[in-house]
Image (cartoon, rainbow, N blue to C red):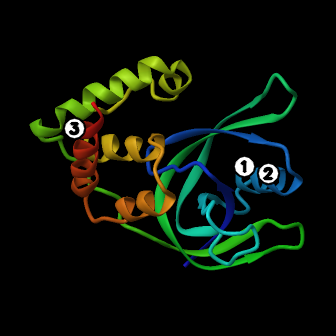
Amino acid sequence: MNELALFPLNSFILPEGRMRLRVFERRYVRLICEASSGKRNFAIAQINPYVAQQHPERILSLATAVRIDDFEQLDDGLLGVTVIGVEKVLITNRWQEPDGLNVADTQALTTWPKHDIAKEYHPLIKQLEKLLQQHPELMALYPEPKYRDAAWLASRYLELLPMKPALKQQLALEQTPTPCLNSLQAWLANYA
C-alpha cells in the first residue's frame, strides 16, 4: 500500500501522459508543496460526473500516480504545474483531511508493456498525429511522440477522447492495450 494525495479532475491521465494543471485552491497548493518537497506524492484521480459531489463513488477507483515535471506562473498569476503519469494505481481506501484534500491508500497496478503496434492499427497513428497537429498545446506536451508503441498510443487516445469515465476506466484496466485499440479502431471506422 502506498498513501497518495489525490488531485481529482474530469480529465484522465495514464503512464507517460503529460498534463498541465492550474493550481489555485489552498489544499492543492499544499499538495504540490508536499510533492515537490518529497513529503507525499500524489495521483490524478478521475471524477464521476454522474453522481453528486458528496457521493462515495464521486472519485473513481483507478488513478495515476504522477510526478511534477515543471512549474510556471500563468498569465493570470496562478501556479501552473506540468505533471507526467508514472503508474496506474487502484484506490483501496479514501478519506479527507481537514482542509478537504482527498488522500488514499493505493495499490500499484501493472503498466501496459511497450510493444510495436500491429499494422492493422496504423490508421490510429495517422488520426492521433492529425489531432496533435490541430492542437499545438497538446503537441507541445509531446515533443517526441511514441506513435509506434501500442501502449503509448492507446493511452493517449484514452486521455484525449471524450468518452464516459467508466468506459475509460474499464479500458485502462485491461491487461494489454489491445482491447482499447480494437475499440478505437471500431470507433474510427464508424465516425471516419
x and y percent of residue 73 in the render?
80, 28
Q: Is residue 41 above or below residue 74?
A: below
Q: Nearer the viewer, residue 102 or 169?
A: 169
Residue 15 locus on image (x, y percent): 44, 50
Q: Amino acid at mark 2?
A: Cys
Q: Which amino acid is tagged 3?
A: Ala
Residue shown at the point (75%, 50%) measured from the top left: 32
Q: Residue under circle 1? A: 36
> Where is residue 44, by image quadrant?
bottom right
Quarter of the figure with residue 53:
bottom right
- The residue indicated by pointer 3 is 189
Is 111 above or below relative to 131? below
Quarter placement of the N terminus: bottom right
Front position among marks 3 and 1: 3
- Distance, label 3 to label 2, CA atoms, is 45 Å
Q: CA distance from mark 2 to mark 1?
A: 5 Å
- Provide the secondary structure element on which disc 3 rests: helix
Query: Circles 2 and 1: CB distance less than 8 Å?
Result: yes
The residue where tag 2 is placed is 33
